[in-house]
Image (cartoon, rainbow, N blue to C red):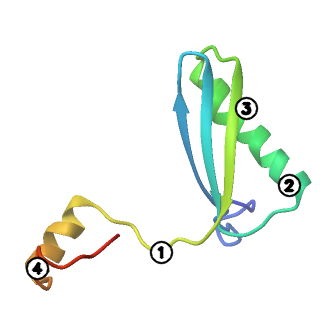
Amino acid sequence: MQGSNLQSNNRLGTVDIHFTTTAVHGTLILERELEEADLTKLIEQIDEDLVLSADMPRDDFLVSVYVGKDVGFYSDEYFAEENNDSLDFDDDDDQSI
């Protein structure tokens, strides 16, 4: 989130962090582009606030950054409701995802 009060908070994106025995891997998905200086500051803040606070030894913090938009949030509950209301797809149809 960006901003100092609740009314001006803007979501920047999401981050997924995965710890291995030697490195920490992060995937940062931004909802809008940031200047390089702001991006590096954000990555440093993620490292300081989330990665280092996990108190796990690491050799490196590797971050992949993407810019995109949120198109939805899906869960088992969503799919259970969808299955009750969905169209039947034939198994014979050649459909790729």
Label 2 packing within 10 angstroms: few (<14), some (14-19), many (20+): few
- Residue 41: x percent and y percent? 84, 46
Instruction: Name the disc covering residue 48, or none.
Output: 3
Q: On the image, which quarter does residue 26 sit in?
A: top right
Q: Amino acid at mark 4?
A: Asp
Report the side of 11 relative to 74 (left or right).
right
Q: Is residue 81 above or below residue 59?
A: below
Question: Of discs 2 and 4, which sits in the foreground?
Answer: 4
Q: Determine whether the residue tagged by mark 3 lies in a helix, strand or loop.
A: helix
Instruction: Name the disc covering residue 90, or none.
Output: 4
Label 1 packing within 10 angstroms: few (<14), some (14-19), many (20+): few
Q: Give yes or no for contact between labels 3 and 1 (Cβ–Cβ under 8 Å).
A: no
Q: Give yes or no for contact between labels 3 and 2 (Cβ–Cβ under 8 Å).
A: no
Question: Of discs 3 and 1, which sits in the foreground?
Answer: 1
Instruction: Name the disc covering residue 38, or none.
Output: 2
Instruction: Name the disc covering residue 19, or none.
Output: none
For the C terminus, the quadrant is bottom left
Q: Give yes or no for contact between labels 4 and 3 (Cβ–Cβ under 8 Å).
A: no
Label 4 packing within 10 angstroms: few (<14), some (14-19), many (20+): few
Disc 3/disc 2 C-alpha distance (Å): 15 Å
Report the side of 16 relative to 28 (left or right).
left
Question: Of discs 4 and 3, which sits in the foreground?
Answer: 4
Question: Of discs 2 and 1, which sits in the foreground?
Answer: 1
- Residue 91: x percent and y percent? 11, 73
Q: Report which residue position mark 1 lands on.
A: 71
Q: Amino acid at mark 3?
A: Glu
Disc 2/disc 4 C-alpha distance (Å): 49 Å
Question: Of discs 1 and 4, which sits in the foreground?
Answer: 4
Report the side of 14 relative to 2 (left or right).
left
Q: Residue at x 68, y 41 (%)?
A: 63
Disc 4/disc 3 C-alpha distance (Å): 50 Å
